[in-house]
Image (spheres, rainbow, N blue to C red):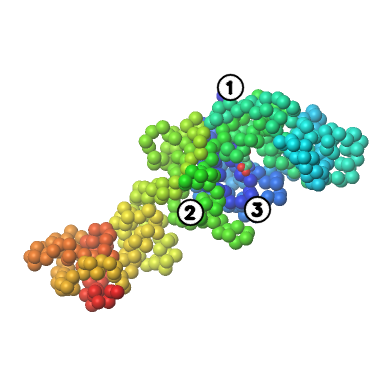
Amino acid sequence: MERKVRVRFAPSPTGPLHIGGVRTALYNYLFAKKNGGDFLLRIEDTDQTRYVPGAEEYILESLKWCGLTFDEGVGIGGSFEPYRQSERCKLGIYKKYVDQLLESGHAYYAFDTPEELEAMRERQKIAGSSSQQYDSVTRNTMKNSLTLSAEEVQQKIESGNSYVVRVKIPKNIEIKFKDIIRGWVVVDSSNLDDKVLYKSDEMPTYHMANVVDDYLMKISHVIRGEEWLPSCPLHVLLYQFLGWENVMPEFAHLPLILKPDGNGKLSKRDGDRLGFPVFPIEWKSSEGELFSGYREGGYFPEAVINMLALLGWNPGTEQEMFSLPELIHSFSLEKVGKSGSKFDPEKTKWFNENYLRAKSDVELATLLKPILALNGISSLSDTYLISVCRLMKERATFLKDILEKGTYFFDAPKTYDAETVKKKWKDDSAKIVSDLVLLFSASDFTAANLETTFKKYVEDNGIGFGVAMIAIRLSITGQGGGPQLFEIMEIIGKEESIERLKYAIQNINKESIV
Ligand code: GLU
């Protein structure tokens, strides 16, 4: 029988979610939706020493902003919380399986102090051994339930000695598993160490909790970053030791996201160093360090998702713009490449620009309002804003560009672009503007009428079209370029336009330009 597809995104709340983590969540989500499966969120927070306050909230908010909703969690009805391993631990979920491993001889107690562990590494180094790990070679020289008597072990545990439970990795066996992206992976068990599975603070480590939960949650596919590939042989062994081989999930380890120049992994500091965000939303560390986010940078979540989807996955066609439903339709793990993908911040802007242009003027106006309000602009009508968006959207990459490049829609110019004045404001420019003030005042203020009036005036008076046009544009907008001038005038209206033209006649002059 085909297994129901169930995948999970399993972040540890050790800091903000890097854009690579968002991609992992996205690929899990797409794979689940494509296959009619479930997408779970599991917070892996058993390592209390690495817990960062606020990180879990950050993860939840980031996923919400990206529109990656999970299907299952703790609680009933629509309002469930993600699974949290720290809470599951209190229910004794993991201890049971640790005991099973201890009983079957696949795990053992170890009581070594940090100093004893260090001494072992030193000894190994001096002996010229290439590996200084706790493993089938060194375990016999250490303080553990394989070298101590059963009474000693019992006594140590009862007297409250701190201990760990380690996995007993068999010597020289071949561990083999198939990765959907990488094909067969074969590892010699001699390269693995006896990793800690459980600690006397009653907390399982990542490996133990991760495998037990994947089993209990009936996870069919583990899709995660390449950095977890080295842990996978241990996970495969744990499935075998616990007798769960027949329900072991399939694995897919995603390629790294590389710096834009391809030199190494994209790190959390690269973004602000190179001028682009590497986090979905802004993050302020407890030391007060601020990391910029895509949300605050004015990116649409659709653009970020589209960019991330193509960072490692190749649809096999020329198509670049994908909505979430289109991604779900086209996605497959088989089309995810093995090699790292270079991060391309310019491409993200390109996506944003395209998503912005694809939005209706009405939607853009709605989205623009809060940005305007932040800038103290709140008195403009919807109709006005819709028209502004219609004219400006072809010139904007971000919503804020509409405000920044189209300042003249929100305020009359007080200064005029110096370069344009110097080159294009001629001796007769003021006269042209005054003549047109009279003609425009008498005309019906639609773009078409204004254009006819303007054209007739320049033709009748043998004036250069360009000279006259730039004089009016400078007067109305303060700038040398922009969208269709008569459309701008129609939008800002007769009274305001005439006032600006009159003001310009008095205030634009070459002498004032330095
Ligand atoms: N907790 C691990 C992380 O932080 C999860 C790795 C996995 O998906 O197995 O990425």
501 over 11 or under it: above or below? below
Element on which disc 3 rests:
loop
The amino acid on which the numbered mark 3 sits, given as a three-letter code, is Val
| Mark 3 neighbour density, 10 Å: few (under 14) some (14–19) many (20 or more) | some
Element on which disc 2 rests:
helix
Residue annotated with mark 2 = 274
Residue annotated with mark 3 = 52
User: Who is closer to the viewer here, 103 or 73?
Assistant: 103
On the image, the x and y values in percent for residue 237 come to: 69, 29
The reply, left or right, for residue 328 in relation to residue 234 is left
The residues bearing labels 3 and 1 have C-alpha atoms spaced at a distance of 42 Å
The disc, 3 or 1, on the residue closer to the chain's N-terminal end is 1
Q: Nearer the viewer, mark 3 or mark 2?
A: 2
The disc, 3 or 2, on the residue closer to the chain's N-terminal end is 3
Task: Check the picture and name the quadrant holding the N terminus.
Answer: top right
Which residue is painted at 24% across and 58% down in the image? 484
The amino acid on which the numbered mark 1 sits, given as a three-letter code, is Met
The reply, left or right, for residue 101 in relation to residue 294 is right
The amino acid on which the numbered mark 2 sits, given as a three-letter code, is Leu
Q: Are marks 3 and 2 in contact (CB under 8 Å)?
A: no
Residue annotated with mark 1 = 1
